[in-house]
């Protein structure tokens, strides 16, 4: 079997000094971000839900045999809703904690305090 010549030839890397840098867009951040990608859906209690469905399947969907799993799932979902409510409350008050996950409104508020020089 013959090996094509294109497979044998190794390409050498380009010389960095011969490639000029062309700035297409300015190398700085904008002073604001859009909120398009902020609408992420958080999945809650997947482990508890899968355990509940497995129990229901094993017991022919009779709920009285899976009361422990149902209560675990309801408790998990209640804590998820409480946590979500606290996050919305903090967002509404405008509390900014650097290092935490910020939504786009909080991030824009934070960026307004440190604008880029012109």
Image (cartoon, rainbow, N blue to C red):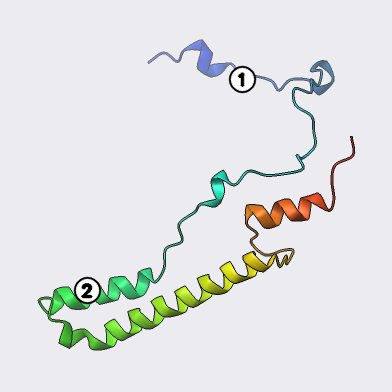
Which dot, 1 or 2, sits closer to the camera? 2
Mark identifier at residue 71: none
The image quadrant of residue 64 is bottom left
The image quadrant of residue 32 is top right
Residue 48 relative to residue 16: left or right: left
Vertical side of 72 occupied by 47: above or below: above
Mark identifier at residue 54: 2
Q: Can you name the residue that lies furthest to the front here?
A: 92
Where in the figure is residue 52, as x and y percent of width and height?
A: 26, 76
Assess disc 1: are there few (<14), some (14-19) or many (≥20) residues with their C-alpha within 10 Å of its C-alpha. Answer: few
Residue 57 relative to residue 112: left or right: left
Depth check: 97 or 4 in front?
97
| Secondary-structure class at tag 2 | helix
Vertical side of 63 occupied by 96: above or below: above
Quick one: label 1 or label 2, which is nearer the N terminus? 1
Q: Residue at x 34, y 83 (%)?
A: 72
| Secondary-structure class at tag 1 | loop
Q: Residue at x 60, y 71 (%)?
A: 89
Q: Residue at x 79, y 20 (%)?
A: 22
Q: On the image, numbered disc 1 is attached to which residue?
A: 10
Mark 1 to mark 2: distance in Å?
A: 55 Å
Where in the figure is residue 31, as x and y percent of width and height?
A: 77, 43
Q: Quadrant of the N terminus?
A: top left
Where in the figure is residue 114, as x and y percent of width and height?
A: 85, 50
């Amino acid at each position: 079997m013959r090996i094509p010549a294109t497979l044998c030839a190794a390409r050498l890397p380009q010389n960095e000094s011969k490639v000029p840098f062309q700035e297409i867009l300015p190398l700085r951040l904008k002073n604001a971000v859009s909120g398009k990608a902020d609408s992420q859906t958080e999945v809650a209690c997947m482990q508890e839900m899968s355990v509940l469905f497995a129990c229901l399947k094993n017991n022919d969907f009779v709920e009285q045999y899976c009361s422990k799993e149902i209560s675990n799932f309801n408790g998990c979902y209640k804590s998820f809703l409480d946590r979500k409510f606290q996050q919305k409350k903090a967002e509404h008050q405008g509390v900014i904690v650097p290092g935490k996950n910020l939504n786009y409104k909080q991030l824009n508020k934070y960026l307004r305090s440190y604008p880029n020089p012109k």
